[in-house]
Image (cartoon, rainbow, N blue to C red):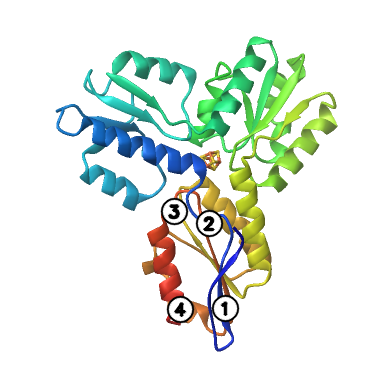
Amino acid sequence: MSDRIVFEKNGKTITLAEHSGFCYGVKTALQKTLKTVEEYEGTGRRVYTFGPIIHNDDVVNDLNMRGVQICSAPGSTEKDAAVIIRSHGVPASVEAALRDSCGQLIDATCPHVKKIHRLADDAYHEGRTIVVIGDAGHPEVQGIDGWCGNEAVIFSDPAEIERPKNLARLNRAEEILAVAQTTLNRNVWDACTEALLRRYPRAQLRCTICSATSSRQTACRRVAEISDAMVVIGGRNSSNTTRLAEVCALTCPRTFHIESVDELEATAFAGCRRIGVTAGASTPENQIASVEAFLKTL
Ligand code: SF4
């Protein structure tokens, strides 16, 4: 796979960046959900996802039409229901509570995230202090925190190390292990770990940015560098899509982060000869195709 020229005519080129669209973790979570829906059809038992299965309203609405509901707390479903944990994963305590409160628990946590849970769990039980470089409000980071006693030091800006609360925790630490939110921008990891090592030179680093994220960011940067305009498709609440838009905007100021083709205006592309397209890990093929079709008409 590589960047793909989807249109080339009269000096106008539209290029789709490599690795656009569903990643392995999202694809697998959706497959597990659809398989469960089929298995439960006609049984009278319900299927829930713990939170929206992916950051995409169309996909979530389609699943809802097929009877899949969203729950947000363990114990809020029927006792015989199936509950699917999405690719972001959940804290250990939530996993245990879900297991106890529903008929069948299907764990669709992405293996990349699961690996971080294990690292955090092991380090916590060995008495190490865990630093998560990422967004403290993101469910994936909250899930990781929950595998280390909700005691992780979390930040995504190097200056945040200096917060009294963080310094108090880190100064007490015998050993420090730093991991990354899987969708983190590599530059943020570099800046934060540099600041961490300056203060705590013996801190151990495990860069757990997932390869799907880093490859996608590299590809969109490559396409943005040669484009007059970039279209980034994906939910505004999707962390990996937001990172893509940030990366593109660094070299291509005319970057548009959209959730659907309806948000695009032809006038915004006036004078653009080379247009690039990329899409977040939760963006389905059909949404990418509609954007390509719109851009071809310009
Ligand atoms: Fe897994 Fe990476 Fe996709 Fe996240 S972006 S679900 S970590 S493959």
Label 3 and label 2: CA atoms lie apart by 8 Å
Residue 99, compared with residue 220, is above or below; it is above
Report the quarter where the C terminus lies.
bottom left
| Mark sitting on residue 246 | none
Asked if the residue under mark 4 is in contact with the one under mark 1, i.e. CB atoms within 8 Å, the reply is: no
Label 4 and label 2: CA atoms lie apart by 18 Å
Q: Which residue is mark 1?
A: 13
Residue found at x 57% / y 24%: 117
| Mark sitting on residue 296 | 4
Label 1 and label 2: CA atoms lie apart by 17 Å
Label 2 amino acid?
Answer: Ser
| Direction from residue 272 to residue 225 in the image, left or right | right
Asked if the residue under mark 1 is in contact with the one under mark 3, i.e. CB atoms within 8 Å, the reply is: no
Label 1 amino acid?
Answer: Thr
Q: Which residue is mark 3?
A: 283
Residue 149, compared with residue 164, is above or below; it is above
Label 3 and label 1: CA atoms lie apart by 22 Å
Question: Which secondary structure lies at badge 4?
Answer: helix
Residue 132, compared with residue 283, is above or below; it is above
Asked if the residue under mark 2 is in contact with the one under mark 3, i.e. CB atoms within 8 Å, the reply is: yes
Question: Which secondary structure lies at badge 1?
Answer: strand
Q: Which residue is mark 2?
A: 20
| Direction from residue 158 to residue 86 in the image, left or right | left
Residue found at x 68% / y 63%: 222
Residue found at x 61% / y 40%: 210
Question: Few, some or many C-alpha atoms within 10 Å of disc 4 (few <14, some 14-19, many ≥20)?
Answer: some
Q: Is residue 265 visible?
A: yes
Question: Which secondary structure lies at badge 2?
Answer: loop
Asked if the residue under mark 2 is in contact with the one under mark 1, i.e. CB atoms within 8 Å, the reply is: no
Asked if the residue under mark 2 is in contact with the one under mark 4, i.e. CB atoms within 8 Å, the reply is: no
Res 127 → quadrant = top right
